[in-house]
Image (cartoon, helix red, strand yellow):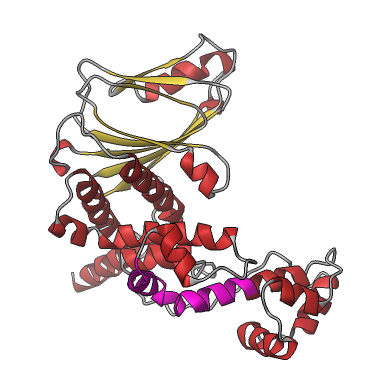
């Protein structure tokens, strides 16, 4: 009997440390081409009516992945961008969940693509309709998790903030362990509550996911002006809309905002040096990223990567080092919080995981 208890305990611990996996994964390609849209409509038939705007099609390609985060279901639907889908409520849906949806392009996350996102918050029991094409993210929450009206109003800036959070959450799902799921679900609910019915307590509870969204916005601003000498903490505070102290606190896991920018610039020079198609001198590559003193640059580079710029160039041109590879040290605890998980992933500090 003792042996069984010990085995059960070990199995439970191992299970908790496993990566989070999809609970449901569907693909219309498993059905015959003429039946694929009907198969897709069947997936949602008990909660939503979905139709093709413009009539029937000969073929319909779509996949759907669903992750279970406690009582929350997170769905990602990828459909052909050539097909415009119309989603409408059913008169008697099987559940009265809230649905937070984000229509998103397949383009890389940039300030421009971010502005094209559209967020909706609806209750399945309330009349509603929307259209989507391409990728759609949808968060399903039990009715009693949000204390708001059936048709909540949300400011454009708050809607964009939530959209950014859902995209970030999706990006981080592959890094989650089962033991983190309860904290992620709780933080997500706090985030929604803080936006829909803001109060001091709710904002405090949602601090971790709010910081994570601010981080991703700051990183987009950094990437857009990485080679610009005017890139500074002051510029980022103004661009992202946060105080200097908060910006410093958010980037503390990366050693501070200035240290993060320096690392990103060193990584960019490393990528350029390892690219055999780049014929610029080492001094030119360094200067393009703001490193005007060659000896100082060389010392910083070797301290960061363990190799000199000349050695990286030689290895890259011999095709022994991939120009896109990135190395960044991290000091991650064995039981990270949602805050550290999202921010470290956003900062590129979990790539070795």
- Residues rendered magenta in the picture: 243-265
- The answer to whether residue 129 shows anywhere in this view is yes
Q: Is residue 252 a member of the stretch shown in magenta?
A: yes
- The answer to whether residue 216 shows anywhere in this view is no
**Where, by quadrant of the figure, is residue 295 drawn?**
bottom right
Seen at 25% across and 65% down, the residue is 8
**Where, by quadrant of the figure, is residue 124 drawn?**
top left
Seen at 54% across and 63% down, the residue is 222
Residue 60 vs residue 278, the one in the foreground: 278
Percent coordinates x, y for residue 247 in the rendering: 38, 69
Residue sticking out furthest to the top: 55
When the figure is inspected, residue 344 is found, relative to residue 312, above or below; the finding is above
When the figure is inspected, residue 298 is found, relative to residue 316, above or below; the finding is below
Query: Horizontally, is 281 left or right of 45 in the view?
Result: right
Percent coordinates x, y for residue 153 in the rendering: 23, 34
Q: Is residue 216 a member of the stretch shown in magenta?
A: no
Percent coordinates x, y for residue 12 in the rendering: 28, 64
Dominant SS of magenta comes to helix
Query: Horizontally, is 40 left or right of 337 in the view?
Result: right
Marker count (numbered): 0
Seen at 22% across and 54% down, the residue is 186
When the figure is inspected, residue 132 is found, relative to residue 243, above or below; the finding is above
Quadrant that contains the N terminus: bottom left
Percent coordinates x, y for residue 59 in the rendering: 59, 17
Residue 77 vs residue 255, the one in the foreground: 255
């Amino acid at each position: 009997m003792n042996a069984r208890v010990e085995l059960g305990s070990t199995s439970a611990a191992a299970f908790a440390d496993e990566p989070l996996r999809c609970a449901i994964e569907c693909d219309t390609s498993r059905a015959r081409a003429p039946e694929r849209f009907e198969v897709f409509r069947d997936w949602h038939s008990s909660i939503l009516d979905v139709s093709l705007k413009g009539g029937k099609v000969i073929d319909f390609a779509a996949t759907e992945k669903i992750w279970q985060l406690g009582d929350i279901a997170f769905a990602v639907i990828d459909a052909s961008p050539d097909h415009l889908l119309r989603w409408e409520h059913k008169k008697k849906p099987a559940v009265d969940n809230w649905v937070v949806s984000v229509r998103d392009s397949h383009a890389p996350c940039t300030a421009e693509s971010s502005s094209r996102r559209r967020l909706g918050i609806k209750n399945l029991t309330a009349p509603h309709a929307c259209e989507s094409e391409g990728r759609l993210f949808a968060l399903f929450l039990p009715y009693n998790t949000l204390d708001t009206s059936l048709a909540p109003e949300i400011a454009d800036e708050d809607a964009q903030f939530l959209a950014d959070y859902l995209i970030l959450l999706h990006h981080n799902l592959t890094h989650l362990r089962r033991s983190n799921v309860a904290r992620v679900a709780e933080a997500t609910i706090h985030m929604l509550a803080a936006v829909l019915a803001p109060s001091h307590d709710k904002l405090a509870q949602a601090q971790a996911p709010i910081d994570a969204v601010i981080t991703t916005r700051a990183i987009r601003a950094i990437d857009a002006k990485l080679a610009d000498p005017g890139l500074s903490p002051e510029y980022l505070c103004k661009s992202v809309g946060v105080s200097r102290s908060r910006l410093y606190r958010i980037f503390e896991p990366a050693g501070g905002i200035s240290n993060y920018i320096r690392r990103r610039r060193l990584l960019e020079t490393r990528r350029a040096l390892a690219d055999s198609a780049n014929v610029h001198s080492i001094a030119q590559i360094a200067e393009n990223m703001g490193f005007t003193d060659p000896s100082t640059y060389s010392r910083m580079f070797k301290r960061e990567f363990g190799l000199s710029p000349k050695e990286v160039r030689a290895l890259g041109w011999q095709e022994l080092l991939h120009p896109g590879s990135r190395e960044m040290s991290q000091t991650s605890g064995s039981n990270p919080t949602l805050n550290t998980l999202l921010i470290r992933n956003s900062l590129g500090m979990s790539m070795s995981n």
